Amino acid sequence: MLDLISFLTQIPVKKNVRIEDVKAKSYLFPFVGLLIGLIVAVAAFVAFGLLGAATDIAALLTLLALYLVTGLLHLDGLADFFDGVMAPGSREEKRRAMKDDKIGIAGLFAAIFVLLLSFFAVKTVGVDLTADAFNFNLVSFYGFASVFVIAEVSAKLSMNTCLMLGKGFDSDEGLGTLFIRSSSPMKYLAALISAVLIALLFTASFRFCIVFTGIVVAFVVSYVAKRKFGVVSGDVVGASNELARCATLLIWAVLFL
């Protein structure tokens, strides 16, 4: 777990990360999502509780806490993914655009758009959770934890799903390929069961099904990757993480609050 936490977050729990250990234990991604979700839930709980009517600032601080914990690696993958999708030309040219170190206008637009959607979703969730009888207690915190833990677990389940779907694609020379080759149906089943159990722990109703949003997003992202690139890369997996979290937060904001 220390290797996984160090690889997927900015938390300094281990200095030297062994990629071999990370890829071998990728089925534990949902548990890292649980940790990230709890940390972000604490930040949101405090921000919305203390700032009151200043909900824009509270939502912004919550997103800041999220990316301070997770880093910008997956957000960079999202930008690279859309640069490749929108690039003209053949699959090879699109792959080159995706691997280019420079971020294009398509990637910049996608990153900003996803961040804005996430911002408004977090704001809506925070306003609703602090609207009636809010107190600094475990009952109120549980509401925040339900939203942010399930959203982050959904994002990590999306990554696991992309890794499994990537097995039917062409090979690629990159970190993503190492994880894809290491994944297996049994590992994916372990990740899926873990994600469902964590979701059930944080909501007592059918709303635990929202964690499956990550699977839907992964199928869509993988389908687009197959059509545009013919391969699932690390950027594709990172993009699925960001899109799944955003989609899950939006569903919470629109349907369940």
Image (cartoon, grey):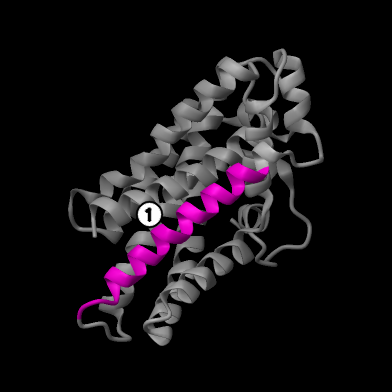
- Image quadrant in which the N terminus is located: bottom right
Q: What type is the residue that disc 1 sits on? A: Ile
Question: Badge 1 local density, few (<14 within 10 Å), some, or many (20+)?
Answer: many
Residue at position x 49%, y 46% in the image = 156
Residue at position x 30%, y 60% in the image = 202
Q: Farthest residue in the left direction?
A: 205
User: In this rendering, is residue 197 above or below 58?
Assistant: above
Toward which corner of the image does residue 109 lie, by quadrant? Answer: top right
Residue at position x 44%, y 41% in the image = 191
Between 10 and 226, the one nearer to me in the picture: 226
- Image quadrant in which the C terminus is located: bottom left
Q: Residue 131, can we see it?
A: yes
Where disc 1 sits, the SS reads helix
Mark 1, residue position: 150
Residue 121 at what x, y percent from top left?
39, 58
Per the rendered image, the range of residues in magenta is 108-132
- Report whether 119 appears left or right of 129: right
Q: Residue 234, can we see it?
A: no
Does the segment drawn in magenta span residue 21? no
